[in-house]
């Protein structure tokens, strides 16, 4: 059975809304701050959640077992004698971090117990917590960079299509020049002129400026084509004949025509820019430690021995898949002409 197009759009928006809300609420969902280290448990494997103890008794509250070093394997093994119940809606005594710090957290265990749902990294930091916090950087870099690209593309494309002539020629030749720029080398050049150590906020906005600043050409060209068609329509010509000025015509008659192109371009550009941030941070050109992003978390898995012995370090790469699929599905629903 074919799902109607409006239903697919609503489902896609709900799906993406839930995923973005999850990373916004990282301070509540993550059991630990992103920089908290458990030096006794570097490279701990993902832990199991238990309901039955070693005597077979059922517990109403789930629990995790303690971890002890396993000298034979060089890893850790669970000690059933150590039982640490998982507390839900627990007070968050840790230092606030993230965009929306929470006074409580969804779950946690009392010390000296630890809960690593996706294991820990080389510093003993919880990968799940860093994954959720890292989504704030990666996802919102994509959103803001796409917003910058679309804003520039809308302004340039509307001006080029509406005014035509030398304005159109100048803007489109400039667009071709921007398209020819190698943005990776541009970022390297900009980074070389900056101080060696820049703040996380500066690195975040540098990524947005570079990624969004060179990506406006495609939406600008598409919007230009729509505006060229709209300005020749009968009602625009009639409004012009009644004395309407360019500002009024653009605001009331031209911009509504561009809404569909802007929406569909947003669903295409956002996943591209998320991947761009992941790539740049993986290469060390984005947000640096200790603030996590999916890119700099993946950088720890570059070494072959780390990847083979600790495959859970690939979790940030896998986390990007449902986000990208959600945007691709939404873009397909917006551009589809069938099943409406």
Image (cartoon, rainbow, N blue to C red):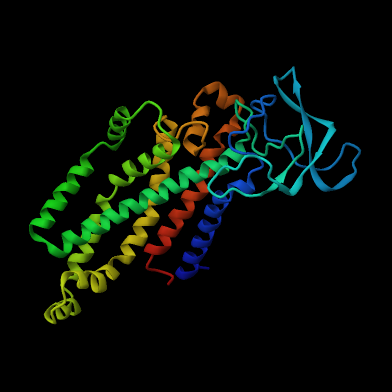
Q: Is residue 39 above or below residue 101?
A: above
The number of numbered badges drawn on the structure is 0
Question: Which residue: 63% across, 48% down?
Answer: 29
Residue 70: x percent and y percent? 75, 21
Q: Quadrant of the C terminus?
A: bottom left
Which of the 4 image quarters holds residue 221?
A: bottom left
Is any atom of residue 4 visible in this view? no
Closer to us: 328 or 273? 273
Left or right of 57, for residue 229: left
Q: Residue furthest left?
A: 166
Left or right of 288, for residue 74: right
Residue 73: x percent and y percent? 71, 20
Which of the 4 image quarters holds residue 312?
A: top right
Residue 123: x percent and y percent? 61, 26
Q: Is residue 38 above or below residue 15?
A: above
Question: Which residue: 23% across, 70% down?
Answer: 254
Closer to us: 13 or 239? 239
């Amino acid at each position: 059975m074919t799902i109607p197009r409006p239903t697919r759009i609503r489902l896609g928006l709900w799906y993406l809304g839930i995923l973005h809300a999850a990373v916004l609420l990282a301070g509540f969902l993550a059991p630990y701050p992103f920089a908290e280290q458990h030096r006794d448990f570097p490279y701990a494997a993902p832990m199991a959640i238990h309901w039955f103890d070693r005597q077979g008794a059922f517990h109403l509250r789930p629990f995790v077992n303690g971890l002890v070093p396993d000298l034979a394997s060089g890893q850790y093994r669970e000690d059933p004698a150590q039982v640490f119940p998982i507390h839900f809606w627990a007070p968050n005594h840790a230092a606030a971090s993230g965009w929306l710090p929470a006074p409580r957290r969804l779950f946690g265990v009392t010390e000296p117990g630890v809960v690593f749902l996706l294991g820990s990294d080389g510093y003993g930091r919880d990968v799940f917590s860093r994954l959720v916090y890292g989504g704030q950087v990666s996802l919102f870099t994509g959103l803001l960079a796409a917003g910058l690209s679309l804003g520039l593309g809308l302004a340039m494309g509307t001006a080029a299509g509406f005014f035509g002539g030398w304005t159109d020629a100048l803007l489109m030749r400039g667009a071709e020049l921007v398209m020819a720029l190698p943005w990776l080398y541009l970022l390297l050049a900009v980074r070389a002129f900056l101080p060696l150590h820049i703040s996380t906020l500066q690195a975040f906005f540098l990524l947005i400026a570079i990624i969004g600043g060179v990506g406006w050409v495609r939406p600008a060209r598409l919007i230009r084509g729509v505006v060229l068609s709209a300005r020749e329509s009968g009602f625009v010509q009639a409004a012009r004949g009644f004395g309407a000025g360019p500002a009024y015509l653009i605001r009331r008659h031209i911009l509504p025509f561009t809404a569909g192109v802007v929406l569909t371009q947003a669903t295409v550009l956002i996943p591209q820019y998320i991947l761009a941030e992941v790539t740049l941070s993986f290469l060390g050109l984005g947000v640096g430690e200790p603030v996590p992003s999916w890119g700099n978390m993946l950088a720890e898995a570059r070494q072959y021995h780390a990847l083979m012995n600790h495959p859970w370090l690939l979790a940030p790469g896998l986390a990007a898949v449902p986000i990208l699929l959600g945007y691709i599905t939404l873009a397909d629903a917006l551009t589809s002409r069938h099943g409406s």
